[in-house]
Amino acid sequence: MTQPYDRAIAQELKEKVALSCRVLYQQGLADYLGHPSARIPGTALVIIKPRHGRDIRGMQEMTSKHMLVVDLDGNVIEGDYAPPTETVLHTEVYRVRPDVSSVIHTHQTMTTAFGITGRPILPIMHNESALVERPIPILPTAMLISKPEQGAAVATALGDHRIVHLQNHGVVIAGPSIEQSTIDAIFLERLAVMNHLVAQIGEPRLVTQEEINQVKAEQQPVGGRWAYYTSLVDTNV
């Protein structure tokens, strides 16, 4: 039996997940691969981007009409397309993390490179450093996450962190909202790029935990950053 959910809230989330797709594309973090999702509040249902194919192409083309509603077993509750092969990557995280309302999986270049080498992304920039105040855990796998036990392994490796590297594959980012997870993906890549640049120059000064705590206390709500990044994409697709 399908559990009831608020259609107006679901529609708003579909629009946000589609916007996340277009922002991730515009920022060079995803092309046709990768997928964001968001939990419908108070339910075990998830809005997710569909699987790419002949009719579902680049992330820049995604709209609310393409989005799916799936349950935690990956069954399509609403929508006209097939879900991603890696839907279990999302659903198994939601299953064990009630605090998580959004999951994003990308193959973003520099972040993935750090995961492949096992080299930590260091806290060296003010706004971004909170993402790595604890080292990012690594799940050593190059495999497609297509089976429930693989999704469960991702959730276990993530633990209570915000991010987990899928070594030789990509990265998974979990957060309290689709807006926050999208911004985290952008900030994480920016931080990885800066780590790479600084490594060519010399030894970095690390942002201290005290400074990280102060930046977090003073940081404005995510809405302003979300408004900026969504202003860069076509809202009329």
Image (cartoon, rainbow, N blue to C red):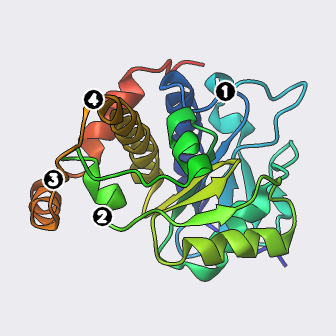
Reading the image, the residue beneath label 2 is 133
Mark 4, Cα crowd under 10 Å, few <14 / some 14-19 / many 20+, is few
Reading the image, the residue beneath label 1 is 31
Tell which circle, 3 or 4, labels the residue nearer the N-terminal end.
4
Percent x, y for residue 154? 67, 68
Tell which circle, 1 or 4, labels the residue nearer the N-terminal end.
1
Label 2 sits on a secondary structure element that is loop
Tell which circle, 3 or 2, labels the residue nearer the N-terminal end.
2
Question: Residue at position x 57%, y 33% from top?
Answer: 109
Reading the image, the residue beneath label 3 is 219
Question: Residue at position x 27%, y 29% from top?
Answer: 201
Q: Which mark is residue 201?
A: 4
Label 1 sits on a secondary structure element that is loop
Percent x, y for residue 176? 42, 64
Label 4 sits on a secondary structure element that is helix
Please identify, in this view, whether the residue under mark 1 or under mark 4 is nearer the observer: 4
In the picture, the quarter occupied by the C terminus is top right
Mark 2, Cα crowd under 10 Å, few <14 / some 14-19 / many 20+, is some
* Amino acid at pointer 1: Asp
Percent x, y for residue 84? 81, 48
* Amino acid at pointer 2: Glu
Mark 1, Cα crowd under 10 Å, few <14 / some 14-19 / many 20+, is many
Tell which circle, 4 or 2, labels the residue nearer the N-terminal end.
2
